[in-house]
Each structure stands twice: as C-alpha cells, then as structure tokens.
Amino acid sequence: MTKKPWSKTAKLGGKLLAPSILSADFSRLAEEVASVEKLGADWVHVDVMDNHFVPNLTIGAPVVASLRKATKMPLDCHLMVENPEKLIPAFLKAGADGITIHVESTKDVAGAIKMIRDGGARVGITLRPRTSLTEILPYLPDVDLVLVMTVEPGFGGQSFMHDQVEKVTRLKAERESKKLDYVIQIDGGVNRETVRELGDADCLVAGSFVFGASDRAQALRDLS
C-alpha cells in the first residue's frame, strides 16, 4: 500500500489547524466552513458518530458530499462508529480526503486500513483515552495520521485530559525511532491554555474554541 502523507505545512505557521464542524451552525454549514477557510484553517474535521460506538448521533456521508462542493480544504473524517468497513465506501465516494478509524471499533483493523488506502484516501487511526497505546503500535507503519483523543469520544465541549499528552510524546519518539511519517493529531478540549502542552503535536482539532469564538481569527492564531 502506497502511503500519502498529509502536508505538514500549516498556513498559519506552527500547527495544522482542523476546526471541527461538530460545533458549527449546521443551518449554515457551508458559510461556517468558508469562514474558517478564509481565516487560514488547514482542514475540516468531520466527527461521525453512530449512537452505538459512542452515545451520540451526528452526520453521514451526504453531508460530506455537500461539504466537498463547498470547500477546497481536505475533509478529515473521524469515524466513531462500529464496524467502519460498512461506511468507509460511502465516505470515500462522498469525497473524504482522510478517514480515521478507532482501533476498538473493528475486528479487522488491517482490513479497514487497506480499504481506505485502496480507496485513495489518507489513513488515520485513533483510540479511546483509556485504551493503551500498544494497541495501535502494530499499525503505525501503515497509517498517515494518528489521532490522540484528549476527551472521551462522543461529545463536544469536554474538558481536556492532561494525562493523554504522554501518548503524544511517545508517538513522536516512535515516529523518530522507526523513521515513520505520520501526522500526530489532537482532538478534545484544545484551546489557548491547553495548546501549551501540545508542542509535539502536528495538527490540532478544535470545535467550540473556534466556532464559538467571537473572534475566530484570533482563536485560530491562538492555536497556531
């Protein structure tokens, strides 16, 4: 499988910024995405929840297809769903640039990775905060992105879990020692205070901190 690493060049400087539409106004989603694109965001982060793997229900592939027409930014889709293999083809068809799956969500992680790769998208892997990092280590050579959850998946607006920062440090060390090239992404409770702990991360996902800000330009600058 040929890897397709994400560009690590952020338009605002230090970090790739991926505002999460979970906190956007869904009644005017195209406008919301256009606003952060204009201000220098790098990716659009799409949280997909199925009310099974996590206790919430969000959006499906049709919304991604609509977003694909509305923005040139990469669509970074985080599937918090059981048996992601059933949904991966639909998100690929909808135009997802990258698809991230949970190691806990499928009995065939390698098969799901191959499905994403063969479909032409970039591959991400993630884990719940209470899952040991050892569960994803075997898959690191085959992915383009590793997402560290600093909240429990399923809801926006949660408090940052400081004990998860250690995973970022370990992932950076693993990347250097094995000469790998995945992007380290953080999602959950990211704001102007918690970003100080995230120097080893490459990409920051932020929902309410960006979309809920009175000055979104300043919010993005605070994270970069």
Image (cartoon, rainbow, N blue to C red):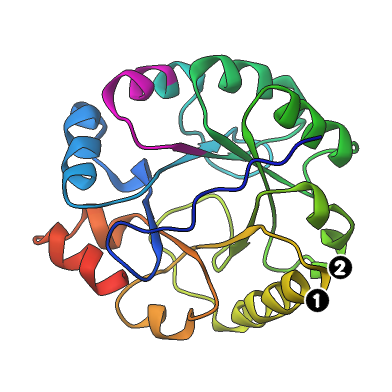
Which residue is rendered at x = 9% and y = 61% of the image? 215
Tell me residue 76's x, y (percent): 49, 40
188 or 144: nearer the viewer: 144
Quarter of the picture containing the C terminus is: bottom left
Mark 2 → mark 1, Cα distance in angstroms:
16 Å
Quadrant of the rendered image containing residue 38: top left
Report the span colored magenta.
65-76
Quadrant of the rendered image containing residue 184: bottom right
Residue carrying label 1 = 177
Under mark 1, the amino acid is Ser
Compared with 98, 214 (above or below) is below
Residue 132 appears in the figure = no
Dot 2: element? helix
Q: Which mark is residue 203?
A: none
Residue 102 appears in the figure = yes
Which residue is rendered at x = 39% and y = 45% of the image? 43
Which residue is rendered at x = 76% and y = 36% of the image? 2
Residue carrying label 2 = 134
Tell me residue 158's x, y (percent): 44, 65
Of label 2 and label 1, which has the lower sequence position?
2
